[in-house]
């Protein structure tokens, strides 16, 4: 239930002080690590429920819905003050700050397009290039919290047959290709993300005859792959929390469906194969009993990078056959 906010918090100096402190530390850290896209702030000051992500001179500024109701016009003034503060401290112009409001997901609602026009540009990570768009969708095309997970995949990919499920824009596949994977298959149901993935792979000189893109429902793909006896050495699966796409047969609920999805993946793994499974559902509980006969490790403490104050931004497990 929405509630009136106590007088709208305009203590921008408090927000600015925390943002400045974070920026000084993380900018030096990023320079040492060779990181050019990173999170600077995430709801550190509760009265400023914002996430500030830096993308090579541009800023992705997200406001999280708190349920507070503001007086007419006051919210716009508050947003303008936040944009001014971010621009001053990070030394970027207001036109380089891309603001979005991330509403709470209710029921079967899903995040989609913002209705804004495309504004793509190239950023760099780990020696690779990625197309991002800070305007058109709520997500940008590159999940910064999986920077370490992508590195792990790249380090393990040499001579491997790789399967990337719910591939999104194929950032994991880019790392696998650069890590000299023998081949890869990237599966996603969205035409938009398949095309985005294709462009990311071409940006990084991947051979599309060896690194295939497959538009398919992951559930159907897994059933057919198991039935045909396909095998992979390395599987990455980072599903959305929920999906009710009309293109799917049924719906995806990751808490409900994770056991079936992981078990199908394990059937596809070759001897000594590896599966990385992750989710950003904060209430998620892995059904460990379902995998009592399988070796698996919770890698979350190693895969969430230093720039993320919220250490539960995702959970990640590593399974071995």
Image (cartoon, grey):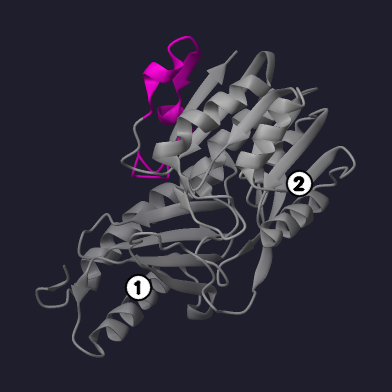
Q: Secondary structure at mark 2?
A: strand
In the image, taking residue 22 as reference, residue 134 lies left or right, namely: right
Q: Quadrant of residue 14?
A: bottom left
Residue highlighted by disc 1: 85
- How far apart marks 1 and 2 lie (CA) works out to 44 Å
The one nearer the camera, 13 or 121, is 121
**Residue 59 highlighted magenta (yes or no):** no
Vertical placement of 219 versus 116: above or below? above
The one nearer the camera, 303 or 124, is 303
Residue 25 visible within the image? yes
Give residue 50's position: percent from left, percent from top: 33, 63
Residue highlighted by disc 2: 214
Give residue 207's position: percent from left, percent from top: 88, 42
Magenta residue span: 286-314
Give residue 134's position: percent from left, percent from top: 56, 67
Give residue 190's position: percent from left, percent from top: 66, 57
In the image, taking residue 137 as reference, residue 50 lies left or right, namely: left
Mark on residue 6? none
């Amino acid at each position: 239930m929405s509630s009136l906010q106590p007088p709208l918090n305009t203590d921008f100096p408090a927000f600015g002080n925390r943002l400045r402190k974070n920026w000084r530390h993380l900018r030096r850290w990023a320079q040492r690590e060779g990181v050019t896209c990173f999170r600077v702030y995430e709801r550190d000051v509760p009265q400023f429920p914002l996430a500030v992500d830096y993308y090579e001179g541009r800023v992705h500024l997200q406001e999280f819905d708190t349920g507070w109701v503001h007086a007419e016009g006051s919210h716009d003034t508050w947003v303008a003050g936040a944009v001014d503060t971010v621009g001053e401290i990070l030394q970027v112009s207001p036109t380089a700050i891309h603001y979005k409001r991330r509403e709470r997901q209710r029921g079967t609602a899903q995040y989609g397009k913002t209705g804004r026009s495309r504004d793509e540009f190239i950023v760099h990570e780990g020696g690779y290039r990625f197309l991002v768009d800070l305007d058109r969708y709520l997500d940008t095309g590159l999940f910064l919290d999986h920077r370490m997970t992508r590195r792990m995949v790249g380090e393990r990919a040499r001579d491997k047959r790789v399967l990337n499920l719910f591939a999104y824009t194929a950032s994991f596949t880019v790392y696998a290709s650069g890590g000299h994977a023998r081949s890869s298959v990237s599966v996603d149901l969205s035409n938009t993300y398949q095309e985005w993935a294709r462009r990311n792979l071409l940006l990084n000189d991947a051979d599309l005859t060896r690194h295939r893109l497959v538009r398919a429902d992951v559930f159907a793909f897994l059933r057919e792959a198991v039935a045909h006896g396909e095998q992979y050495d390395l599987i990455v699966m980072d599903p959305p929390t929920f999906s009710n796409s009309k293109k799917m047969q049924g719906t995806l609920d990751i808490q409900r469906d994770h056991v079936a999805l992981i078990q199908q993946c394990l059937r596809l793994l070759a001897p000594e194969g590896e599966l990385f499974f992750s989710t950003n559902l904060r209430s998620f509980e892995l059904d460990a009993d379902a995998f009592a006969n399988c070796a698996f490790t919770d890698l979350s403490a190693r895969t969430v990078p230093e720039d993320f104050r919220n250490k539960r931004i995702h959970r990640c497990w590593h399974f071995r056959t």
